[in-house]
Image: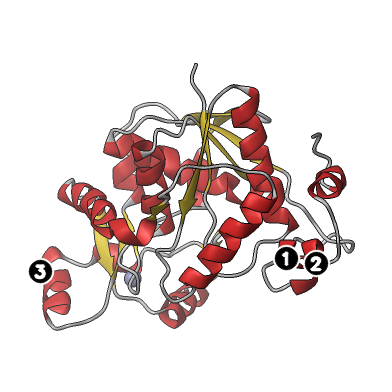
Amino acid sequence: MSVTTRFAPSPSGLLHAGHAYSALRAWDFATKHGGNFILRIEDIDFNRCNREYEDLLKRDLAWLGLEWQEPTRRQSDHIEDFQQAADQLAGGGLLYPCFCTRKEILAEIERAGGAPHGSEGPVYPGTCRSLSNDEGAARIAAGENYALRLDLSAALLRFSTAFEWQDLESGTITVSADDWAQIGDVVLVRKDIKTSYHIAVVIDDALQGISHIVRGKDLFESTHIHVLLQALLGLPQPVYLHHELITDRDGKRLAKRDESETLAALREKGVTVAQLREKLGLSL
Ligand SMILES: [Zn+2]
């Protein structure tokens, strides 16, 4: 079996030890299996990303000893690929426009007496699902801004068996009705950036022939959505490896705002890659 892994950071801040851990796990997995390692720049969120961070993260990854082919795929150069995928889903009647603001969604949830809480926050109560096509079209024609949401129930009706995917650490994962209830009608085309992480990552993983996706446990639940999208779009399902998240001394997950733990700061303090690997529990 040929192995291709990837590391796909967002250039929205400096990389820290948590990113290094994820990148090294993907790199080590590829090299151990004589495979390829791909670097992809996930910069669809133009409000948060910039080129300066892209240069800095490449410098950090080179310091870690990683090698990749240039040019790297930059997601912002391929928005039309993602829009095509959304069009395909919309053509199958699986997307609907949602005009709700965050405030309206929270108010609706309060009225309904609560909502299941998933990894991305409270589940969307489905307010706009019942809008007629005419009403939706009229509001769009009137210039109202909208997101496109996946009609999850309609999507799942296409499949007769439960979704399964493979995780190299957790084994075979079966997505239960309860898991889906905590996901709900996710946004696949955001109001602001006209696509979404879920669509972009699924399309690029397929386009780039990623066989093994190594990433943090924070994305475990997102994988349920990704395998559903892969099935709906006729894309292959890769194997996953969700690793533990690296935390700081207080057990808090490292965040981009923790400047003291950035790779640049560690390097400046004289920390070597070998020392960093040891600290992260990774062999050389
Ligand atoms: Zn809505």
Q: Which residue is identified by label 3?
A: 134
- Give me the C-alpha separation between circle 1 and circle 3: 54 Å
Image-quarter location of ligand 1: bottom left
Q: Tag 3: Cα neighbours inside 10 Å, few (<14), some, or many (≥20)?
A: few
Query: Could you tell me the amino acid type at mark 1?
Result: Ala
> Which residue sits at x=82%, y=46%?
280
- SS state under label 3: helix
- Give me the C-alpha separation between circle 2 and circle 3: 60 Å
* Disc on the earlier residue, 2 or 3: 3
- Residue 161 seen: yes
- Give me the C-alpha separation between circle 1 and circle 2: 6 Å
Q: Which residue is identified by label 2?
A: 268
Numbered badge on residue 264: 1
29 or 236, which is in the foreground?
29
Residue 246 percent location from the top left of the image: 77, 52
- SS state under label 1: helix
Q: Tell me: 36 left or right of 90.
A: right
Residue 49 percent location from the top left of the image: 48, 71
> Which residue sits at x=59%, y=60%?
57
The number of discs equals 3
Q: Tag 2: Cα neighbours inside 10 Å, few (<14), some, or many (≥20)?
A: few
Q: Are marks 1 and 2 in contact (CB under 8 Å)?
A: yes
> Which residue sits at x=43%, y=68%?
45
